Image: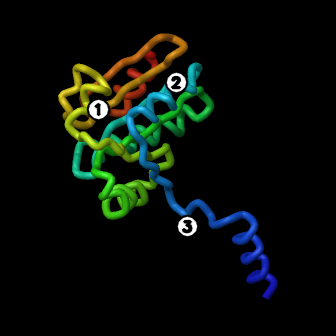
């Protein structure tokens, strides 16, 4: 009886454990993303554009997870930005996020014109996936890559920023 009461107490006052709750995925527009990137002037942002239907994207996501773990003491923020349609949030994005046990922040692009956003992200982006941007505003650095990363290449690109 004591253990049941203790468990109920922990659940009520501390909330469900992260394993029960799972990863939260928020919708975001490109304007909101820009504002977010502007807030962390001394932070390096790694923004990976991916989709649940993109095999190379899914293959490289664990590399971003490893980078996040290994750089947890650095001023770095890894954002995994799905370009799936917002209607796929519950049927595709959340299940993949859970299956891959993603710990980095997962966002879902919420743009009305799915054809216009690649040019807004980077003029050289054809829209092909995967794609990644490294941004450090305080250093005035921004690098865009339209390719699949190995872990070593990802780490090298991060260090170049």
Q: Which mark is residue 20?
A: 3
Against 43, is 10 above or below?
A: below
In front of the other: 137 or 28? 28
Against 111, is 155 above or below?
A: above
Q: Which mark is residue 131?
A: 1
How far apart in space, not on screen, are marks 2 and 1 (Cα)?
A: 20 Å
Q: Which-is-in-front pick, marks 2 and 1? A: 2
Q: Which mark is residue 150?
A: none
Q: Do tag 1 and tag 3 residues touch (Cβ < 8 Å)?
A: no
Q: Which residue is mark 2?
A: 38
Q: Residue at x 34, y 30 (%)?
A: 132
In front of the other: 118 or 5? 118
- Secondary structure under badge 3? helix
- Secondary structure under badge 2? helix
Q: Residue at x 47, y 35 (%)?
A: 78
Q: Is residue 1 visible?
A: yes
Q: Earlier in the sequence, mark 3 or mark 2?
A: 3
Residue 75 in the figure: left or right of residue 113:
right
Q: Earlier in the sequence, mark 2 or mark 1?
A: 2
User: Dot 2, crowdedness within 10 Å: few (<14), some or many (≥20)?
Assistant: some
Q: Which-is-in-front pick, marks 3 and 2? A: 2
Question: Residue 43: where, in percent of width, then height?
Answer: 56, 24
């Amino acid at each position: 009886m004591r253990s049941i009461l203790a468990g109920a107490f922990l659940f009520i006052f501390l909330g469900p454990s992260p394993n029960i709750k799972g990863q939260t995925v928020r919708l975001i527009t490109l304007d909101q993303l820009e504002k977010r990137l502007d807030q962390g002037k001394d932070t390096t942002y790694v923004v990976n554009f991916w989709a649940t239907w993109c095999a190379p994207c899914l293959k490289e996501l664990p590399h971003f997870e490893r980078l996040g773990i290994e750089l947890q003491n650095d001023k770095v923020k890894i954002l995994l930005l799905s370009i799936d349609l917002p209607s796929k949030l519950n049927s595709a994005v959340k299940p993949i996020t859970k299956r891959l046990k993603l710990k980095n922040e997962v966002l879902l692009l919420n743009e009305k014109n799915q054809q216009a956003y690649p040019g807004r992200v980077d003029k050289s982006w054809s829209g092909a996936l995967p794609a990644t941007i490294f941004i450090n505003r305080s250093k005035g650095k921004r690098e865009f890559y339209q390719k699949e990363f190995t872990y070593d290449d990802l780490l090298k690109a991060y260090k170049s920023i």
